[in-house]
Image (cartoon, grey):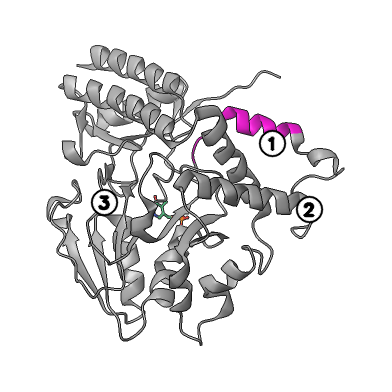
Amino acid sequence: MKHHRIRNFNAGPAALPLSVLEEIQKSFIDYKGSGMSITEVSHRSKWFDDVINDATARVKRLLKIDDNYHVLFLQGGASLQFCMIPMNLLGDDRRADYVNTGTWSTKAINEAKIQGKNIQVVASSEDKNFTYIPKEISYNKDAAYLHFTSNNTIKGTQWASFPETDKVPLIADMSSDIFCRPFDMSRFGLIYAGAQKNMGPAGVCLVVIRDDLLKTAPDNLPTMLKYATFAAKNSMFNTPPCFAIYTVQLVLKWVEETIGGLEAMHKINQQKADLIYGLIDASNFYKGTSAVDSRSIMNVTFRLPSQDLEQAFIAKALENGFGGLKGHRSVGGCRASIYNPTPLEAVQELIDFMKEFEKKNS
Ligand SMILES: *Cc1c(COP(=O)(O)O)cnc(C)c1O
């Protein structure tokens, strides 16, 4: 059967590599001669063990980390991490720093605050409606960690380089840009990412945590909310989201083996972003919403001259096979999410469509 596939610019859940979907389809009924689907085998079986171990090994290779870090596959999405991080890492005698760059940072800050934790917002871009990434971060030297959002999915901003905090470990919500480029993990105590943006389907959240940070949780923390619980059991204290982890495994394999790793991935992502921003910069019709030096290579946010034109643009785009271009409901406008799996050709086709739409409507 011929696929009827649209050019998918959804923000999350988002596009997956077609080759991954095809591999899932091919193996779905009878996984590796087991006579069962991967959604039917025991999570204690050799089949699933191989899946989670391979996914873990790939994360470690991509991030260039060793056994000093633990790779965890958790449920509850990135949103549960907003709570778990202060629960596990921020005892009553410590404080932590947060940078506020938009909706997701704000949620992380609120979840620490409602637990009565001692936190300080040390930098924010709220003064300009979160359209930029703050430059000067005056962190506290005694902070347990500094938390920031590496890519702001809704506002379309992204840290080009990460804050310098000397010995204070960085913690980042990388939900919408994990594995989009290489970075130095040794400066991080913990990173986390809901899989459904850049890495797989909804239902699993990747957490990578440094070994020493497993020991800071209070004794009375419920077992299911402790990182150490999952680190000790290879993420299988209880039944893990097997199918989501399997899909993540295949996407990571695609990044490593088909694309050729994070340097190659970054190059393609930069090409895609340059194409759209190039068009926006050359146009009096499309207008980017984020500061040029803070632009995201994952979520390109832009406006048209009027809301009517934006509506027409989104509708016409869909007619032409381009989906997911509506901006987040909290900000309006348009957004093209161009995560790892979005092929360069999809962006080239979108550019052609945008040029034609501009010609007809300006
Ligand atoms: C989507 C998103 C979240 C929320 O993720 P859930 O898995 O739905 O909890 C958090 N942070 C960022 C940066 C996101 O893009």
The amino acid beneath tag 2 is Lys
| Residue at image coords 38%, 39% | 181
Magenta range is 14-26
Element marked by disc 2? helix
Q: Residues within 10 Å of mark 2 (few under 14, many from 20)?
A: few
Ligand 1: image quarter = bottom left
| Residue located beneath label 2 in the image | 46
Q: Is 109 situated left or right of 337 in this image?
A: left
| Residue at image coords 33%, 40% | 327
Q: Residues within 10 Å of mark 3 (few under 14, many from 20)?
A: some
Q: Is 194 situated left or right of 152 in this image?
A: right
Element marked by disc 3? loop
Residue 24 within the magenta-colored segment of the rendering: yes
**From mark 1 to mark 3, how far is it between C-alphas?**
36 Å
| Residue located beneath label 1 in the image | 24
| Residue located beneath label 3 in the image | 162
Instruction: Check contact, mark 3 vs mark 2: CB within 8 A.
Output: no
